[in-house]
């Protein structure tokens, strides 16, 4: 599907040289990816951040409701107001989506490594992206690009009846499939292994699309798989990245808005086995 030009063509933004290198690419590490760059907005900054007590993974089953309550409280303080998103974040046991060794850190507001050089997104990033994408509406069918370990898809499935998620790394796809087979998200997430840059043409149009990895440019194919009136949210850029919100306003019109500075793992073409 070759269109004469990208519907949102604009001059390329300038990039900065990244300081260090890693398996993810220059300047990336599992600890600094899929997060926003700046801290909470000044007007919501709590004086003393709530600390989640370090709990052995084995005890988290008992304590995790309380730790999630604290996480949700912190998300509210950081400006998240969408109650459906907040209760979805309360419902999904994030510690079950990370390695046991990291389970005690699962309710910190941090991205964590999930293997293959990828990360589970920061809770604020997940909550913010889902709130902005759904915009107070109830999207019936949502596509997620970059399922990773499946956490965000599980959160989505708490309030979206049909969730489609694509992951390009085989090992993570397998991990997400196992994680999503348990718990309340069961059966509501249809996971595929493949290159999400192509979207999922046979399931389009979507009432929302969430992209969890940053490309130089948001793939045009995805814009065409949005329903009219629906929203896509995605990070865009390389060394300097921003969250971008795109709303499809008509059959051939889209509105673009630039949001926060963020740092995400790279959106890559093809698959990795
Ligand atoms: N959604 C995850 C975030 C995972 S990190 C969460 O719940 O926290 C982003 C993921 O995007 C990585 O697992 C990476 O492998 C994947 N990814 C990158 N490019 C992709 C592509 N073209 N198609 C599908 N997945 C992609």
Image: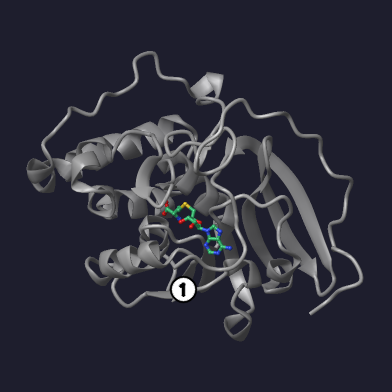
Q: Residue at x 48, y 33 (%)?
A: 32
Q: Is residue 176 above or below residue 57?
A: below
Q: Residue 60 at what x, y percent from top left? A: 13, 43
Give 159 or 236, whichever is nearer the viewer: 236
Q: Residue 158 at what x, y percent from top left? A: 36, 63
Q: Where is mark 1, residue-wise? A: 193
Image check: 33 left or right of 179? right
Q: Residue at x 22, y 38 (%)?
A: 67
Image quadrant where residue 110 sits: top left
Image check: 149 left or right of 143? left
Q: Is residue 139 at least partly visible in the picture?
A: no
State which quarter of the image contains the N terminus. bottom right
Q: Secondary structure at mark 1?
A: strand
Give 201 or 258, whichever is nearer the viewer: 201
Q: Is residue 137 at least partly visible in the picture?
A: yes
Give 244 or 140, whichever is nearer the viewer: 244
Q: Residue 271 at what x, y percent from top left? A: 53, 68
Q: Is residue 91 above or below residue 162?
A: above
**Residue pushed farthest top?**
47
**Residue pushed farthest right?**
4
Q: Residue at x 36, y 75 (%)?
A: 188
Image quadrant where residue 152 sits: bottom left
State which quarter of the image contains the C terminus. bottom left
């Amino acid at each position: 599907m070759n269109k004469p030009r990208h519907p949102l063509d604009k001059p390329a933004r300038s990039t900065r040289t990244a300081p260090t290198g890693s398996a993810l690419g220059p300047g990336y590490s599992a600890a600094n990816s899929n997060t926003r760059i700046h801290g909470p907005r000044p007007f919501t900054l709590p004086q003393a951040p709530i600390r989640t007590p370090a709990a052995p993974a084995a005890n988290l089953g008992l304590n995790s409701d309380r730790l999630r309550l604290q996480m949700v409280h912190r998300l509210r303080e950081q400006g998240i107001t969408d109650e459906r998103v907040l209760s979805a974040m309360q419902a999904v046991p994030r510690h079950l989506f990370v390695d046991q060794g990291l389970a005690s850190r699962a309710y910190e507001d941090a991205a964590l490594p999930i293997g293959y050089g990828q990360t589970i997104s920061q809770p604020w990033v997940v909550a913010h992206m889902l709130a902005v994408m759904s915009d107070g509406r109830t999207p019936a069918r949502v596509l997620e690009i970059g399922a990773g370990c499946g956490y965000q898809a599980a959160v989505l499935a708490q309030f979206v009846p049909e969730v489609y998620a694509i992951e390009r790394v085989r090992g993570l796809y397998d991990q997400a499939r196992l994680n999503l087979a348990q718990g309340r998200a069961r059966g509501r997430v249809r996971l595929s292994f493949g290159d999400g840059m192509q979207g999922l043409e046979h399931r389009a149009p979507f009432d929302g699309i969430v992209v969890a990895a940053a490309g130089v440019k948001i793939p045009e194919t995805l814009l065409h798989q949005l329903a009219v009136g629906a929203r896509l949210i995605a990070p865009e850029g390389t060394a300097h990245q921003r969250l971008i919100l795109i709303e499809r306003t008509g059959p051939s019109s889209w509105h673009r808005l630039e949001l926060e500075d963020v740092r995400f793992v790279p959106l890559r073409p093809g698959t990795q086995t």
